[in-house]
Image (spheres, rainbow, N blue to C red):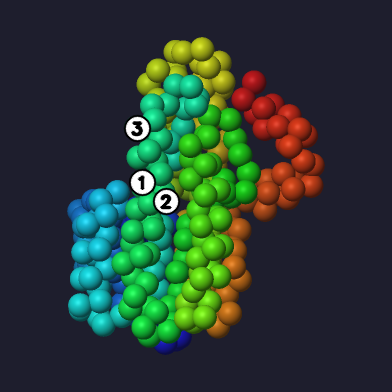
Amino acid sequence: MSQKKVILITGASSGMGKETARDLIRAGHTVYAAARNLANMQDLSEAGGHALSLDIAKEGEAAQVVARVIEEQGRIDVLWNNAGFGLYGPVEQVELDQARYQFEVNLFGLAAVTKAALPTMRAKRSGLIINTSSMGGKIYTPLGAWYHATKHALEGWSDCLRLELKEFGIKVVILEPGLIETGFAAGVKHHFADEAVSGPYQRMVQALLKTAESGAMKGSDPSVISKAVRKIIRAKRPRTRYLVGAMAKPLVYIRNLLGDRAYDKIILSQVK
């Protein structure tokens, strides 16, 4: 087994965060799983992990969680910033407060956890930070403007962070999942602005919801993410990006190969 690591994972109460946390505990690592829903992480505690309550949109809680791990373990070897969600709806109809909350969770909350962890990592001149972006940080889809905006922002933010931390021996890796069976499709429906269902964009909204409900957005099992994260942690020199899961590589390839107008045509054909 590789050297035992102290690992902090946000967004660990379900999906790929929870499954990966479980696998890392089994591998013998010291895993702190953080999320709002403590009850959903009870099984991780029973397996030998540490479950912590964290509302990532509250900066004070981020600092408290990081301080707790450092107090108990003296270090954080790996920080996996995995918490996030997808807000969908037409730009015209999504309230700006909703959009701001999307950024609070997907970018600023992630930044708060990272900033809290950096002083100790920097002092030890070692550490690994994995940021969960998405293939959505490389492509775009209709009705997902605010979600894609956060992921595109996270890509640039992570690239800059990687350069800033290189001299301190801290690695920054961007994880770019494709479609993963984590309930994201159901979340798309849940996070739609209510007005959008019957508003001027209802044709496109209903088409996208129909696609989500049809199973056409079926993704890879979360185990592919667990495998990728474990590979990143073991690597002496991990890649800067890992594009993993259903449709991730094909869609990004098509986007880069065909250019904007051809890509637009293909994507719009899916919401007719």
Residue displayed at 27% across by 55% down: 59
Residue 49 against residue 211 in the figure, above or below: below
Front residue of 119/152: it is 119
Q: Quadrant of the N terminus?
A: bottom left
Q: Is residue 214 left or right of residue 265?
A: left
Residue displayed at 61% across by 71% down: 239
Q: Which quadrant holds residue 81?
A: bottom left
| Disc nearer the start of the sequence (2/3) | 3
Residue 245 % position (x, y): 58, 54
Q: CA distance from mark 2 to mark 3?
A: 15 Å
Q: CA distance from mark 1 to mark 3?
A: 10 Å
**Callout 1–callout 2 Cβ contact below 8 Å:** yes
Residue 190 against residue 50 in the figure, above or below: above
Residue 74 against residue 172 in the figure, above or below: below
Q: CA distance from mark 1 to mark 2?
A: 6 Å
Label 2 crowd bin: few (<14), some (14–19), many (20+), radius 10 Å = many
- The residue that label 3 is drawn on is 97
Residue 166 % position (x, y): 53, 77
Q: Amino acid at mark 3?
A: Asp
Residue 192 against residue 74 in the figure, above or below: above
- The residue that label 1 is drawn on is 104
| Disc nearer the start of the sequence (1/3) | 3
- The residue that label 2 is drawn on is 107
Q: Which quadrant holds residue 235?
A: bottom right
Per the image, label 1 sits on a secondary structure element best described as helix
Q: Is residue 210 visible?
A: no
Residue 93 % position (x, y): 44, 21
Q: Is residue 99 visible?
A: yes
Q: Is residue 262 left or right of residue 233?
A: right
Residue displayed at 58% across by 79% down: 237
